[in-house]
Amino acid sequence: MSQNLPNPTISFAVFKRETLSDQIVNQAINIGNLVNRLVSNFVFISPRRNFRKSPRILALIQRSILLADEKEIIFNDWLNDTCIEFIKANSLFLLILDSSIGLNASFEEWLVALLNEFPDSLDAVSICPVDSSTIEISHNGSEPMRESLTLNYSGFIFSRRAAQKFIRAFDQSPSGDFQRVIEVSKIVCGSILESSPNQPFYFLDILSSQITYQSEIKIPLVNECHIKNERLTHLYERDIKVQVFISHWFSTWDNIHCVERSCLDFGYDTTVLNTTIQDKEGWENSIPISFFRQFEFACRTFDSNNEYMLFITADVKTDKWIDFFRYADKVLKLKGIGTFSPTLTAATTDQFWPVPFLYFDPESSAKIPFRNDIIVTYIQKQLVEKFLLFLDYFNRHPDTFNPVIGWGPDQIIRVLTYHLDLIGVRDRTYTFMHPWTNSYDTTLAQSEMMKIRDIADQFFKENSLEPMDVIDQRIMDSSNKESFKILIQDINQLK
């Protein structure tokens, strides 16, 4: 793929359609691949995502009095917000892809060529073909197209005119029927031909799982929409104090100032852990590049007058930091939150350890994972204090060593979370861009992790706790606890 495409005039977004549990991990990996590939040339858009049990969607269902087969309300609402973000951007076109889509090797070059030939008569074009009408559009381009009555939601392109029409139509008449909104909006549609060699392909296992899930969901009844929860009555009267530590290394110069500025603008007490050779006033300089030692520094520097420590690695990119912080402020006020993370386009927990969720309601924004990575993660102060005890034990242990990388703190925090009867939450409301690639040796990282685990097991034993493997099984056995369900219900009601 060429890395010298024209200055991006294309924004893109990937919709994560719900699947059965068998394809959740495969879909997450594919989304990571799509986003990490396309972001090299195009602008990634990832607006706030609402789910079927969120106040906004329930209000839309009540307002629209949807029919039982109008099941695309989540997609339509997401597309509406995506279009709003697109209109704010400088791009001329918006590419929408489903999470079951795969791209051929020359997709980017083909897409740019297609958009350079975009007919003035059209507002939108399906790049996953639909049954086209009728009239082939006459032009001198390399990709024949036909007019069509609708779009294939698996893959299509909106012009700015199409986005404006969609926003207007959905605002005036929100609907859970995608084809109906396209029709009402009077978007003029086209499609590449079914014979096109350039069209994307589908990962059929993901697609089949999506279709099966979609066939089983039900539109909630209107009387389910407003369930009063007395536990949330005084939620907003509390203030949550957070201290932030941002891990910065040689390859994150392009993003560190955005992350730091966002944290400071929100009012967080913010420290940049600078591992580069270029010192900067106001940062903590000369920090070891070892992730383990960075996290140790953060824990030892953490002021326990704060309720949470937020650890961020500076390779995470989003323009929604402030929105996420504002949302997290509400979530952290709920009782029992041990760790809290957003969704990432790529995470080692999905790539290397595809374990089941302890609690997952696909119609809700939040889930209870087996553990959270320490990439963008709020960590409750009791966990920080307990982890400091482990650090002291680790550093004086006869088998201690100086980790070059230092995978493993998240696994120890998982165990501590369980024993403190706290809950780790990963939320899907916001999805942040995180690269698959890394600048270290994963084989070495895994080797170091096993050594850290061995010392951790001895730490647990001396504190009358079982080895990590036994505790992990106990965590798995705690799946679907009533407290998980209650917490997810409370998060659902946050606006």
Image (cartoon, helix red, strand yellow):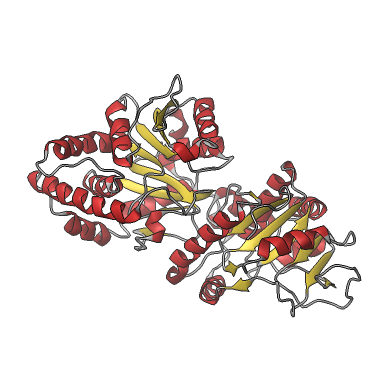
Q: Residue furthest top?
A: 281
Does residue 494 sit above or below 99 in this rendering?
above
- For the residue pair 383 and 11, the one nearer the viewer reads as 11
Determine which quarter of the picture holds residue 245: top left
Does residue 225 sit above or below 146 in this rendering?
above
Residue 436: give x, y in percent of width and height.
47, 54
Residue, x 45% and y 19% (percent of image)? 281
Quadrant of the frame with the N terminus: bottom right
Does residue 403 sit above or below 219 in this rendering?
above
Residue, x 16% and y 36% (percent of image)? 395
Quadrant of the frame with the C terminus: top right
Residue 335: give x, y in percent of width and height.
35, 40
**Residue 65 appears in the figure:** no
**Seen in the image, is 354 located left or right of residue 17?**
left
Residue 81: give x, y in percent of width and height.
67, 49
**Seen in the image, is 411 located left or right of residue 32?**
left
Residue 17: give x, y in percent of width and height.
56, 63
Does residue 270 sit above or below 339 in this rendering?
above
Residue, x 53% and y 64% (percent of image)? 18
**Residue 418 appears in the figure:** yes
Determine which quarter of the picture holds residue 319: top right
**Seen in the image, is 424 located left or right of residue 142?**
left
Marks counted in the figure total: 0
Residue, x 21% and y 48% (percent of image)? 452
